[in-house]
Image (cartoon, grey):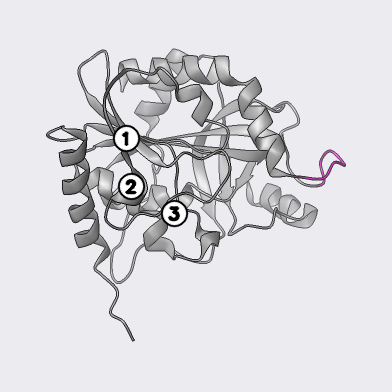
Amino acid sequence: MTEQPDPYALAAEAASSLTQRLGVEKLDAAIVLGSGWSTASAGLGETLGEVSLADLPGFAAPVVAGHGGTVRALRTPAGRVVALFTGRTHLYEGRGAHAVVHGVRTAAAAGAGRLVLTNGCGGLNPAWGPGTPVLISDHINLTGTTPLVGPRFVDLTQAYSPDLRALALGVDPGLDEGVYVQFHGPAYETPAEVRMAGVLGGSLVGMSTALETIAAREAGMDVLGISLVTNPAAGLSGETLNHAEVIEAGTRAVPRLRSLLSGILEVL
């Protein structure tokens, strides 16, 4: 059996390659763009450099439509350096939890202390129509796995930073908050699973974010999570689900998402 590389050493190697290729000394923060968010990132900040994810140790090109394949370094108005990941690895790709969180660990190893995780998701609250951004206040991990191995006891009492959520509300006071439930995917949730998520206290359902948040908190990063509701969750509208509507909802929401991301960059 081939010995698997140490995920922390691999992240350190990737961080060294990333900062060198981007021409920056270190990162201050990182943003991961989920489904429906990429278009809204155009023109954000001063671009310092860009590199293909597939060219960095431990990364692979994204396989999901609507995800880019690069990481871009931006300088914020406050002079901070932020890495913008335009794609991510999902658990359902079969590469394991360490691959899912490799981008987060790489950003942390490169010095980033703050992390913004975005995603496209199904919403359980009927007031959240397609194109509604919602702050994540907490999560429920139903993937059956974790990026932590061994006695790594990480406190998740405040997995999503209250201070960063307050900053986001200062940018967009109309934002609601919800509990995100991560399923394994790639099949969309059944109506029964959506009802279960609601009984457990969830209000957003998707296939990313929770595992990345766990790894980020292990690394000492402060996390801001933002979901883009792209559709009512299964069984709530009577409609079938497909990935095209995720992209369409993101396109319709571009003005608000761009304003939100731009404002967050100014205070991140």
Mark with earlier residue (3, 1)? 1
Decide if residue 240 is in sight here: yes
- Tell me the amino acid under the disc marked 1: Ala
Cα separation, mark 2 vs mark 1, equals 8 Å
What residue appears at the point 52 percent right and 61 percent down from the top-left corner? 93
Q: Which residue is mark 2?
A: 104
Q: Is residue 225 magenta?
A: no
Question: How far across and how far down the image is residue 14, in percent?
Answer: 23, 51
* Residue numbers of the magenta segment: 235-241
**Image side of residue 166 versus residue 38, left or right:** left
At label 3, the amino acid type is: Leu
Indicate the quadrant where residue 229 lies.
top right
> Residue 228, position in %: x, y?
59, 32
Disc 1 residue crowd, few under 14, some 14–19, many 20+, Cα 10 Å: many
Image-quadrant location for residue 150:
bottom left
Rendered residue at 22%/43% (across/down): 18
Asked if 234 appears above or below 262 in the picture, the reply is below
Classify the position of the N terminus by image quarter.
Answer: bottom left
Q: Earlier in the sequence, mark 3 or mark 2?
A: 2
Alpha carbons under labels 3 and 2: distance apart: 10 Å
Query: Residue 72's quadrant in the figure?
Result: top left
Quickly name the residue at label 1: 30
Check disc 3 and report the residue beneath it: 211
SS at mark 3 in the image:
helix
Q: Amino acid at mark 2?
A: Val
Q: Is residue 238 magenta?
A: yes
- Where residue 135 appears, as percent x and y from the top left, is 52, 30
